[in-house]
Amino acid sequence: MTHTIATATSPAASHTEAINAGEIKTLRSSLGEDADAIIGLFLRETADRLIRMGKLDGRTQREALAREAHSLKSAAATFGCNGLAQLALALEEEASILDAATLPARLSVLLQVYEEARSALLD
């Protein structure tokens, strides 16, 4: 199954709901007083992961790119960041065939969607 990743100019094109508010509410409820700290950790680790992904050579480090995208997908889904998880899945699936020149645009979209998710999680 192939997922189309959005272009840098239309990130909403490939995901319908950036954040699942119900999942976040459930997560916050189950984490209790630790919720803010754990969400903060997720946000910091995700920002670091996006930086690492930006430093990868899309031609020679495709496996590392796929691993990073896989980890991002899983973490984002856990925190109800559906749009981010969906884009990470697409990048994971496309890593082996992705044109290296296209990678910066893909990462730009991921960063934009991360910022939207970050805002929603911090509200």
Image (cartoon, rainbow, N blue to C red):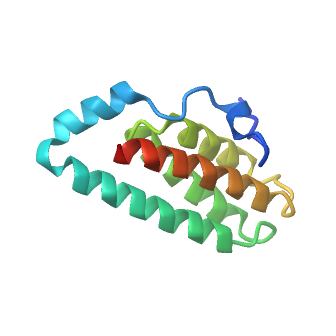
Position of residue 15 relative to residue 85, above or below, is above
Is 46 on the left or on the right of 79, as rendered? right
On the image, the x and y values in percent for residue 24 come to 33, 34
On the image, the x and y values in percent for residue 109 come to 69, 50
For the image, the number of numbered tags is: 0
Position of residue 2 relative to residue 58, above or below, is above
Residue at 57% x, 58% y is: 67
Is 13 on the left or on the right of 117, as rendered? right
On the image, the x and y values in percent for residue 57 come to 75, 72
Quadrant where the image shows the C terminus:
top left
Residue at 26% x, 29% y is: 26
Residue nearer the viewer, 61 or 79: 79
Q: Which residue is outermost to the left? A: 33
Position of residue 34 relative to residue 85, above or below, is below
Is 114 on the left or on the right of 109, as rendered? left
Quadrant where the image shows the N terminus:
top right
Residue at 69% x, 57% y is: 107
Residue nearer the viewer, 88 or 110: 110
Q: Which residue is outermost to the front? A: 123
Residue at 52% x, 64% y is: 49
Quadrant of residue 3 in the image? top right
On the image, the x and y values in percent for residue 106 come to 73, 53
Position of residue 81 relative to residue 63, above or below, is above
